[in-house]
Amino acid sequence: MSYTTAVTPGALPLIGHAWPLMRRPMRFAGSLSGHGDLVEVRLGPVRAYVPCHPDLLWQVLTDDRTFDKGGPFFDRVRSTIGNGVGSCPYHQHRRQRRLIQPSFHPERLERYATVMEQEAAALTDDWEDGQVVDVYRALYGTALRTVLRSLFATQFDAEAVAGFRESVETVLNQLTARMFLPRTLQRLPLPVNRRFDRAVADLRRGIEDLVAEYRRGGTDRGDLLSALIAARDETAPDEAAPDEAASDEAASDEAASGGGSLGDTEIHDQVLTMLAAGSDSVAAAVSWALYLLDRSPEVLTRLHREVDTVLGGRPANGGEVPDLPYTGQVITEALRLYPPGWLFTRVTTERTELGGHQLPPGTTVAFCAPAVHRRAGLYDRPDAFDPDRWLPERARALPKGAFAAFGGGARKCAGDAFGRTESTLLLATIVGRWRLRRAPGSDVRPVALSTALRPRRLLMEISARDARTAEDGQS
Ligand code: HEM
């Protein structure tokens, strides 16, 4: 099979394609496959290759040794939130992943689902008929509390949650923007940089205090932090992947980090990774789903039918997710059109070939899911919102790499089941109890330069539904 390569037109000196990327990220990303299967763009001063063909994206995601995490995005992440499982390089990844994986064991997920259910119920209990809600902000509060309570069974008072919220938001809002800015600008004593540095320091301190408290207590509280503290990597070095065992770098990293368990700094970095990865992603996914549903009455009617039958106006619980397949399809389709994690980078560690094109070591490759998700010919009417694409028989026909909202390969999202369960529970609970209609004053252009692609301001007016009497699903 041969693939086409092209240079994307319209790069400006210094900023490259930053302007269309910031202003209309989905339109820009969606247009890339029209130029070729592998296209060159400029991320600020850096030249990057974007795979727009599912085969090429799959190659990049699954060959994580050659296409290692690095480049402008991960360089900034590491210098900010540390070297957790999501940002560490290949030679440290397998060990870190083995150590965090038990935190997402299905039994633990059941406990987290109870938190999700309670938080979804609390959000929708608080709403009042006729109220106008800034949907992303409300969902962000819910998702952050959910991940905080899943990480730490400890009770947080409102002040502590607000403190975490402010710090996490400040960090996440600037992380992506920082990838386009020269480092010298980020070191200037400007208020924006000071705020950022203070937020990073506050988070660090807050998490360190909690880790110390848990170590003193010494019991498994059933939460994610207990699982991280208890994690033991039983894999002997010679049982590990051959390339991993052979790597001197891996061996010395392991020795430096305490080998078979996670040290305090590592736990801190994992916790920060979960807070960053697990809050705005879910809030953005459900916000886009609500936005799309408001524009698609037929889809909403079908969704109401499913949710009313299964829940009858109650909040959803974790055990009911398999009974809500259409709700799951709506979430997947929202993730296809608006993948919250939409732009990450990789850097080649050796000379390699991608789509027939030779890439020298040190080349930046961008993992930009919407460049494939919105590719004409791969999806019929790629810009249309059609949850039926995800009927199992249709989804099975798609090639690998066609859907990458959770990434792929060894570095696929560790919280994919967590994120899917939470998004499904939230959406089902919301639409079962309330009718949301877009209100004036919204600005749904995506904010590109925050870690999650999200609407700037999605205001929706809320009216109560009575699922027991709703006949056509439109009430
Ligand atoms: C709808 C929700 C979510 C979406 C769309 C999402 C998306 C992603 C994507 C695209 C990646 C891969 C990034 C890359 O390859 O460069 C990733 C990695 C990761 N995500 Fe998620 N995520 C979601 C929810 C969560 C949640 C709830 C958690 C934790 C509580 C989480 C934890 C992680 C971790 C730890 C990684 C790094 C995995 C590794 O490198 O081994 N995510 N996520």
Image: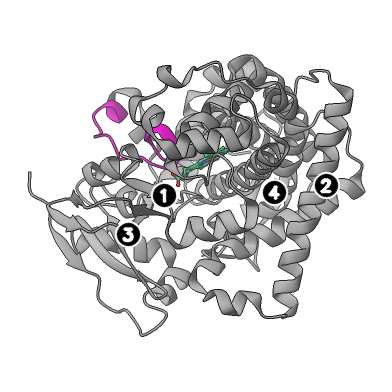
**Is ligand 1 less than 8 Å from the beta carbon at label 3?**
no
Furthest residue toward bottom: 13
Q: Give percent across and percent down for residue 113.
A: 68, 24
Of labels 3 and 4, earlier in sequence is: 4
Q: Amino acid at mark 2?
A: Gly
Q: Quadrant of the N terminus?
A: top left
Residue 41 among magenta residues: no
Q: Are marks 2 and 4 in contact (CB under 8 Å)?
A: no
Of labels 2 and 4, earlier in sequence is: 4
Q: Is residue 332 visible?
A: no
Q: Amino acid at mark 1?
A: Leu
Magenta segment, which residues?
394-412
Residue annotated with mark 1: 337
| Residue 323 position (above or below residue 126) | above
Would residue 137 appear left or right of 359 to someone viewing this image?
right
Inter-mark Cα distance, 2 to 3? 36 Å
Inter-mark Cα distance, 4 to 1? 20 Å
Q: Where residue 362 is drawn, which disc sits there? A: 3
Q: Amino acid at mark 3?
A: Gly
Of labels 4 and 1, earlier in sequence is: 4
| Residue 399 position (above or below residue 334) | above
Inter-mark Cα distance, 1 to 3? 31 Å
Mark 3 is surrounded, within 10 Å at the Cα level, by few (under 14), some (14 to 19) or many (20 or more) other residues, namely some
Residue annotated with mark 2: 206
Q: Amino acid at mark 4?
A: Tyr
